[in-house]
């Protein structure tokens, strides 16, 4: 399918897609105005929640939320080190609170006495822009997961460490694991981390099998988008929604759009999809998508590839430097969960990650889990979260406050 055909379908398909998600919009291209993540999802569930804004070294303003237990007994009782939650691509901190309190990891951790901090990377709706750049400025979107790891995660960890005077537990899902792995290769960041639990862990992507993703990579959609001067990738805009629908035809049915991107998910509540769509997807940058597609094409876990000449300027070498997983301290305890049906965090790529790590993580394998099940499965508490909490408890002594 060529570029002309791709764009020719926009006018026809956009009204269909927008009708399906009309409840999530005011006027089609702008999400309903929201005040804060605490006000939207956490406080209404009965949990104390505080909002923070932190500034990265390159001027981005990130939203952090701090969540406590709804139980007065736990709020006054035992505590463990803080835990930072890092969301996936096109998601934000709300991803950890989309099911009811008995099924959502953010609530479950708070109810077990953890000091829960919720990260929101740059560009997402719960972060708050930049000290000088407008979101309409192309330079606002001049970043990829490389900057999320080296600036956003670094600043989150430094801030939480300064407030709590304690090393952190880190929990990541999908892109949240990519940026965690990259950040952990940096000694000044990882020294403040007590342990990490990674859901659908990714550092390599060359065995991705998701049909829609493979089609986009083959068509070089990422490069086409950048060439068109589109720097913000927002699938809640008319243009972004139309792009997704335009990629579907008789050779690739998108009746189950989620499975075509993530693999077949077994266990989330399909009746809540309309509610999920009120929160997701969040924007990201076109450059970020391009960086991820570079990983698929090249089979590397490296910094952004600008091409030889600009690489020389940026990095002092023709090829972008690799993020060397062997630099992650062997002493850092790791717990990882992966699934047979995950079409993004493929088992072959996961095995490659394990070979590069200097330590042997604790592993949980779930045969029927797809990529989204790791945060939305109705069985995730017993399948994932209880074992994760046991792992954290084995490493930290609870202390009275």
Image (tube, helix red, strand yellow):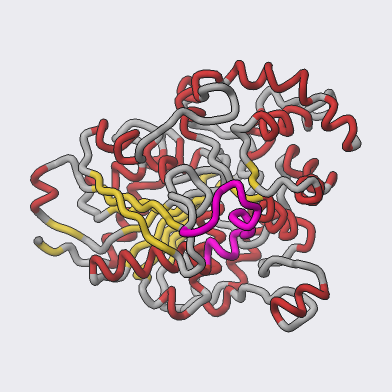
What residue do we see at 36% from left, 51% from top? 118
Residue 365 in sight: no
* Depicted 348 relative to depicted 50: above or below: below
The N terminus: image quadrant: top right
**Residue 158 as seen in the image, left or right of residue 328:** left
What residue do we see at 36% from left, 40% from top? 37
Question: Where does residue 329 sit, x and y in percent of width and height?
Answer: 47, 78
The residue closer to the viewer here, 240 or 84, is 240
**Residue 315 as seen in the image, left or right of residue 59:** right
* Depicted 330 relative to depicted 171: above or below: below
Does residue 144 show up magenta in the picture? yes
What residue do we see at 54% from left, 79% from top? 327
Residue 33 in sight: yes
The residue closer to the viewer here, 261 or 125, is 125
* Residue segment shown in magenta: 131-149
Q: Residue furthest bottom?
A: 316
Question: Where does residue 120 sit, x and y in percent of width and height?
Answer: 44, 51
**Residue 366 as seen in the image, left or right of residue 303:** left
Question: Where does residue 322 sit, x and y in percent of width and height?
Answer: 67, 74
* Depicted 384 relative to depicted 239: above or below: below
* Depicted 133 relative to depicted 187: above or below: above
The residue closer to the viewer here, 389 or 400, is 400
Number of labelled discs?
A: 0
What residue do we see at 72% from left, 26% from top? 254
Q: Quadrant of residue 243?
A: top right
Question: Where does residue 290 sit, x and y in percent of width and height?
Answer: 72, 54
Does residue 302 show up magenta in the picture? no
The C terminus: image quadrant: bottom left
**Residue 163 as seen in the image, left or right of residue 60:** left
């Amino acid at each position: 399918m060529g570029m002309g055909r791709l764009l020719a379908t926009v006018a026809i398909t956009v009204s269909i897609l927008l009708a399906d998600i009309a409840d999530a919009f005011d006027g089609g291209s702008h999400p309903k105005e929201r005040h804060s993540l605490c006000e939207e999802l956490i406080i209404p569930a009965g949990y104390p929640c505080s909002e923070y804004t932190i500034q990265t070294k390159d001027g981005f303003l990130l939203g952090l939320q701090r969540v406590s237990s709804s139980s007065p007994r736990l709020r006054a009782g035992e505590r463990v080190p803080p835990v930072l939650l890092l969301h996936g691509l096109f998601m934000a901190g709300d991803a950890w609170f989309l099911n009811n309190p008995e099924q959502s990891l953010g609530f479950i951790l708070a109810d077990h006495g953890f000091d829960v901090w919720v990260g929101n990377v740059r560009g997402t709706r719960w972060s708050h822009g930049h000290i000088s750049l407008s979101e309409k400025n192309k330079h606002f979107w001049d970043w990829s997961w490389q900057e999320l790891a080296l600036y956003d995660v670094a600043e989150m960890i430094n801030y939480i460490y300064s407030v709590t005077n304690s090393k952190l537990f880190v929990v990541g899902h999908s892109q949240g694991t990519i940026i965690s792995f990259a950040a952990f290769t940096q000694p000044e960041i990882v020294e403040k981390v007590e342990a990490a639990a990674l859901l659908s862990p990714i550092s390599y992507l060359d065995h991705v099998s998701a049909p829609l993703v493979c089609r986009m990579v083959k068509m070089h959609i990422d490069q086409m988008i950048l060439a068109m001067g589109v720097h913000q990738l927002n699938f809640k805009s008319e243009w972004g929604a139309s792009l997704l629908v335009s990629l579907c035809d008789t050779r690739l049915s998108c009746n189950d759009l989620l499975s075509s991107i993530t693999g077949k998910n077994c266990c989330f509540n399909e009746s809540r999809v309309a509610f999920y769509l009120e929160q997701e997807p969040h924007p990201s940058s076109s450059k970020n998508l391009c960086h991820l597609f570079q990983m698929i094409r090249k089979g590397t876990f490296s910094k952004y590839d600008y091409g030889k000449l600009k690489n020389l300027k940026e990095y002092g070498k023709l090829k972008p430097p690799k993020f060397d997983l062997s630099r992650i301290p062997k002493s850092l305890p790791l717990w990882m969960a992966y699934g047979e049906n995950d079409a993004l965090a493929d088992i072959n790529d996961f095995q490659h990650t394990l070979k590069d790590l200097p330590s042997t993580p604790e592993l949980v394998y779930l045969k029927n889990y797809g990529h989204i099940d790791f945060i939305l499965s109705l069985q995730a508490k017993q399948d994932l979260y209880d074992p994760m909490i046991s792992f954290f408890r084995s490493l930290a002594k609870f202390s009275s406050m």
